Amino acid sequence: MYRWWVFVHVAGVLAFLAAHGVSMGVLFRLRKERDPGRVNELLQLSASSTRAFYPALGVLLLGGIVAGFLGHWWSQAWIWAAIDILVLVTMVMYAVATPYYKRIRFVAQAMEGGSQAVSGQQFDEILQSPRPNWIAAIGGIGLLAILYLMMFKPTLGISSNTAAISIPGGSPVVEVSAKNSQFGATTLRAPASRAFRIVFHNEDPGIPHNVAIYTDSSAKQALFVGKIFSGPAIKDYQVPALPAGTYFFRCDVHHNMTGTFEVTASSPSPSPST
């Protein structure tokens, strides 16, 4: 379900950019247009694009919010920063663009109606305003900042999961790592009928993972489910004793991360982490 909601979010982003692109195209086309009638037509085209703009924004937000819950992102600083940037950029662009559009519309409609209050030179000066450059810069920088946060998921200096752990002697230990959304080992081994520990190294910055053990690949019956947490961090999972057998393990966030968990009667050597 996580990937489907990410798909919905990305689809909303694409629709949002398509609708917003119409307004942006009109913004720069107005700088070259001097016919009041044509200017009014372009402004109507820009206004009509908002019919898709707001629904796309709604889909974008819905997909992002649900994916944030499913991916356990809401404890991460980057997602809040992305929302803050989206809100701030939207407000600033509205505050900068709205008066500009209103002024051009007012003057163009007056000139098309035969008014001589504004000369062609004055109309040209209005259309040559540098404001479209500011609007495009604000939107472009904001978009790149949000894209950076989504792709790299920086901790922004807010992280409490990187402390090292100590493992007392006497307990069987299984070690495994995750990097680039892949487990470092696809086969893990532990002793049967003895409680043991899984030391899980999540090496993916800002990406949540866990280790969960199931009876088989259907993942319908869980034997152990480790806490989901974001990297870089280490967790020491306490796993209850399991009967001998061959089981299935995976990351519950990224279902492509899977492997075989072998529980044997004899004490195995620690599983490799790479």
Image (cartoon, rainbow, N blue to C red):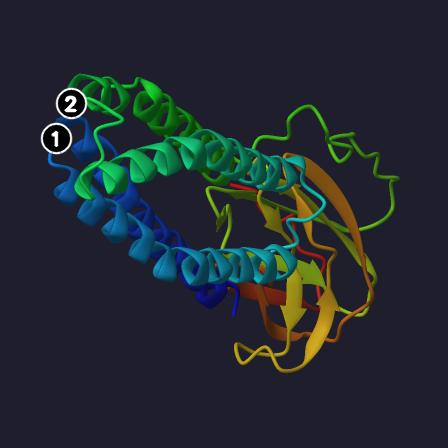
Q: Nearer the viewer, mark 2 or mark 1?
A: 2
- Where is mark 1, residue-wise? 34
Q: Are marks 2 and 1 in contact (CB under 8 Å)?
A: yes
Q: Residue at x 61, y 51 (%)?
A: 209
Image height of 151 relative to 132, above or below: below
Residue 258 versus residue 229: which sits nearer the camera?
229
- Quadrant of the image occupied by residue 129: top left
Q: Position of residue 102 (x, y in %)?
A: 38, 38
Q: Please indicate whether residue 72 sits to the left or right of residue 11 in the image.
A: right
Image height of 154 relative to 208, above or below: above
Which residue type carries mark 1?
Arg
Point out the tag, 2 or 1, that comes first from the N-terminus: 1
- Where is mark 2, residue-wise? 120
Residue 244 versus residue 75: which sits nearer the camera?
75
Which residue type carries mark 2?
Gly
- Quadrant of the image occupied by residue 235: top right
Image height of 166 relative to 45, above or below: above
